[in-house]
Amino acid sequence: MNIVVTGASSGIGFELAKSFASQNHNVLAVSRNREKLLELKRFSDSIHILSTDINIMNKEVISESLSKSKITHIDILINNAGVLVKKPFIELTKSDWLETYNTNVFGVANMIQCCIPHLIKSQIKHIVNISSMGGVGGTLKFPGPAAYSSSKGA
Ligand SMILES: NC(=O)c1ccc[n+]([C@@H]2O[C@H](COP(=O)([O-])OP(=O)(O)OC[C@H]3O[C@@H](n4cnc5c(N)ncnc54)[C@H](OP(=O)(O)O)[C@@H]3O)[C@@H](O)[C@H]2O)c1
């Protein structure tokens, strides 16, 4: 299968990309830190990388990257990239809110829009958005990250 994983430069995304490649799936790994993506690419020839911010991603960039990687369509998009600003609500700045919502909400919607033309060519067509229990329990359960939890609810 052909799988796009965002937030692949660290944590869950990095491990997902390695795991899929080890099961012979093609992976397009997306995140901003190119050095880390190059490190990931060393694990397998099935891992292709695209260093960009998911907010500035556009249809042309993803199309070019897929065709350069000889990937004809996308079977699964995993929106894993996420930002967590951990501050009490009273201390959150406008820029904290914007950074959080740009990645966790608008960036996810943007990735879906950019990938739809390639997903519709697949028989499978899965989109997985990685949320958080913070988005379910909210600030009652997790009092710190109000911007994060509300964005994950979205
Ligand atoms: N770890 C947990 O316990 C936990 C629990 C619940 C939910 N989650 C969710 O699971 C996902 C992964 O968590 P994690 O702990 O593995 O996170 P992490 O290690 O902090 O990794 C976050 C990834 O997102 C990328 N990223 C952030 N903003 C981006 C942007 N604007 N454009 C492109 N890439 C961006 C980062 O790469 P660059 O900086 O290179 O762009 C990084 O690769 C997140 O959505 C998180 O909210 C995690």
Image: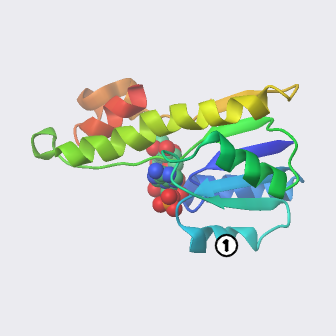
Along the horizontal axis of the image, is 7 left or right of 89? Answer: right
Other-residue count near label 1 (Cα within 10 Å), few / some / many at <14 / 14–19 / ≥20 = some
Tell me if I can see residue 12 in this picture.
yes
Task: Find residue 24 and report its image quarter.
Answer: bottom right
Q: Tag count in the figure?
A: 1
* Residue nearest the observer in this picture, 147 or 105: 105
Residue at horizontal 65 percent and vertical 40 percent from the top:
59
At mark 1, the secondary structure is helix
* Residue nearest the observer in this picture, 133 or 27: 27
Tell me if I can see residue 132 in this picture.
no
Residue at horizontal 74 percent and vertical 45 percent from the top:
63
- Three-letter code for the amino acid on which mark 1 is drawn: Leu
Residue at horizontal 43 percent and vertical 32 percent from the top:
133
Task: Find residue 114 and report its image quarter.
Answer: top right
Pointer 1: what residue?
38
Residue 6 pos. (x, y %): 60, 48
Residue 31 pos. (x, y %): 56, 57
Along the horizontal axis of the image, is 124 left or right of 34? Answer: right
Q: Please state, as top left, top right, bottom left or bottom right, where the C terminus lies in the image.
A: top left
Residue 136 pos. (x, y %): 40, 25
Q: Please state, as top left, top right, bottom left or bottom right, where the N terminus lies in the image.
A: top right
Residue at horizontal 75 percent and vertical 36 percent from the top:
76
Residue 30 pos. (x, y %): 62, 54
Question: How is the protein colored in the picture?
Answer: rainbow
Farthest residue toward the left? 90
Residue 113 higher or lower than 81, as above or below? above
Along the horizontal axis of the image, is 119 left or right of 15? Answer: right
